[in-house]
Image (cartoon, rainbow, N blue to C red):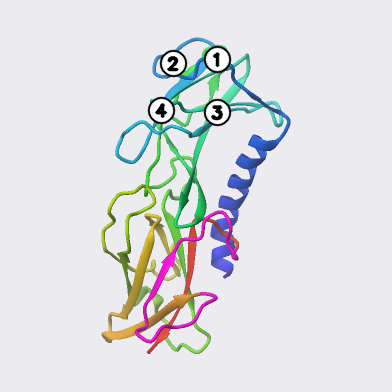
Amino acid sequence: MKILFLKTLLNLVRTAAFVGLLLNAGCSKSGDDPAAGGSATAGFLVGQVTDPQGKPLPGATILADNLFLYNSHLETSSDAKGNYRVKTPTGSYRAIAQIRKSYNGKNYTLDLKPDNTAAFAGDEGAVRNFQWQLTGEDPEQSGRHYGGEVTLDKDILSEIDDVENIEFTFTPVGPLIDGTAGKTLKIRSGEPHSNSYGRIPDVPIGRYKITAVHRPTGKLVQVKNKNGAYAADGSVTLDFYGENSPWACSNCLVIEYKER
């Protein structure tokens, strides 16, 4: 659980900060036409938000965050065509965007990938397009990904000491969070001393049936939800935790394993 805490604390802080920006009285909402995204215009942040298939994504929240004034930002949302536009007074800003989705009874707040991460001058304006991506590394934070993260915890009764040699199979059960069909994934933990040891980063968020096998011996490995029980066949079917997780993470899974 130490690895989980260290690797996901930044995720929680960033999400909490974003939500705080939305709720705090220091924000202001643009009254300008949000449908003018696309072309650079002095004094405006404009752009388009698209889904994983490149189609317009309405309802995304975009912030022009003032880099020099604490808790000072402007907020807008993408329209039916995915476009947005917000007036940016004199100052230095960065653009941030997220989308909130409900999936299998859980709520997920998902960062969107910008096409340009550079800060910009408010009086000059900027174009910043965003896309919802199911996987991939965040260009602003090395080691942070757009997919969900799976933490692999060894059962206290297990004698398996090489989690990197366990192959986990993730079989989609129904569509992924964006409504598309997922693919069966066969994934392993990173090697010892690597950043991904004991975890599987960047899995498209969805519902999966998970099974495992210890590759050197060919023996099946039981898996379960961290706070659940082992099933008779050794598999488990799970959704990723969303905003409300019993662990120090969001958009995550914590599974436990042991030999059968």
- For this orientation, the residue located farthest to the front is 105
- Quick check: marks 4 and 3 in contact, CB under 8 Å? no
As for residue 246 lying within the magenta part, the answer is yes
Instruction: Name the residue carrying label 2.
Output: 36
Query: Spatial distance from mark 4 to mark 1, Cα to Cα?
Result: 15 Å
Task: Give the structural element (helix, strand or loop) at label 3.
Answer: strand
Span shown in magenta: 226-247
Query: If you read the primary sequence from the N terminus, does the residue marked by circle 4 or circle 2 appear first?
Result: 2
Is 35 positioned to the left or the right of 43 in the image? left
Between the C-alphas of marks 4 and 3, the distance is 19 Å
- Mark 1 → mark 3, Cα distance in angstroms: 19 Å
CA distance for labels 1 and 2:
9 Å
Quadrant for the N terminus in the image: bottom right
Label 3 CA crowd tier, 10 Å (few <14, some 14–19, many 20+) = many
Residue visible at 38% across and 25% down in the picture: 81
Helix, strand or loop at label 1? It is loop
- Residue 71 occupies quadrant: top right
Q: Is 9 placed left or right of 33 in the picture?
A: right
Q: Please state which of residues 190 and 15 is positioned toward the viewer in this rendering.
A: 15
Q: Earlier in the sequence, mark 4 or mark 3?
A: 4
Question: In the picture shown, does residue 193 fall above or below 127?
Answer: below
Residue 32 image label: 1
Along the polypeptide, which appears first: circle 4 or circle 1? Answer: 1
